Amino acid sequence: MAAVQSNETRRIHPHKFTLWVAIGSIVMMFAALTSAYIVKKNQANWLEFDLPRVFWYSSFTILLSSVTMHLALKAFKAREMGRYRTLITVTAALGLLFITLQYFGFRDLELRNIALTGPRSNSAASFLFVITGLHMLHVLGGVIALLVIFIRAYSSRVKNYSALPVEMAATYWHFVDVLWIYLFIFYNWIG
């Protein structure tokens, strides 16, 4: 019996394709910034300092939020809407907690006389503030996406709701999680 080959090609949804292009662009931006960090590290005015301890807590928080996002997506696909609503709420709250903890990390640096600009600034501090600040903005974008699907989760039309937005939010959320872990490892052990 001859094998039947399908001429049908698998197509990626245009929104998913756009998301992957955006993720690729973000990866290139952070790769460029961390590469510049390594090059600039040889400057005479480079100041070595430890990351704030609160960044460890924020790392745990974003990892935990990735777990809750994964479980929320599974619950949505199983049409367990009560569980989905709870998990998407927890994920958004953990995202906001991550941003709050990052802010406290910035405050800790300022209390240690490490600043983004001015006389207390140096290249190392500027890179840290810019790179982590940009990541924080991308997490905020993810939180906004989570809030949109959170609002949709409580609408009356949720039963007919496509999984695509939830899948895309999950993909982006896992991406900002992996990106933060990369940055955290980079700052602690590579850079």
Image: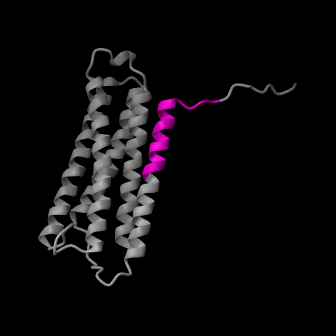
Q: Quadrant of the C terminus?
A: bottom left
The part of the image, by quadrant, that contains residue 3 is top right
Nearer to the camera, 128 or 181: 128
The part of the image, by quadrant, that contains residue 160 is top left
Residue 185: x percent and y percent? 38, 65
Judge from the rendering whether residue 65 lies leftward or rightward of residue 38; answer left or right: left
The part of the image, by quadrant, that contains residue 54 is bottom left
Q: Main secondary structure of the magenta part?
A: helix
Residue 7: x percent and y percent? 74, 25
Residue farthest to the bottom?
Answer: 44
Residue 177: x percent and y percent? 37, 51
Nearer to the camera, 92 or 37: 37
Nearer to the camera, 143 or 27: 27
- Vertical order, 92 against 132 (above or below): above
Was residue 14 drawn as part of the magenta stretch in this picture?
A: yes
- Vertical order, 119 against 176 (above or below): below
Q: Which residues are magenta?
A: 10-26
Identity of the residue drawn at 25% across and 22% down: 154
Residue farthest to the right?
Answer: 1
Q: Quadrant of the N terminus?
A: top right
Was residue 141 drawn as part of the magenta stretch in this picture?
A: no
- Vertical order, 67 against 165 (above or below): below
Judge from the rendering whether residue 148 lies leftward or rightward of residue 27; answer left or right: left
Judge from the rendering whether residue 54 lies leftward or rightward of residue 4; answer left or right: left
Residue 175: x percent and y percent? 41, 48
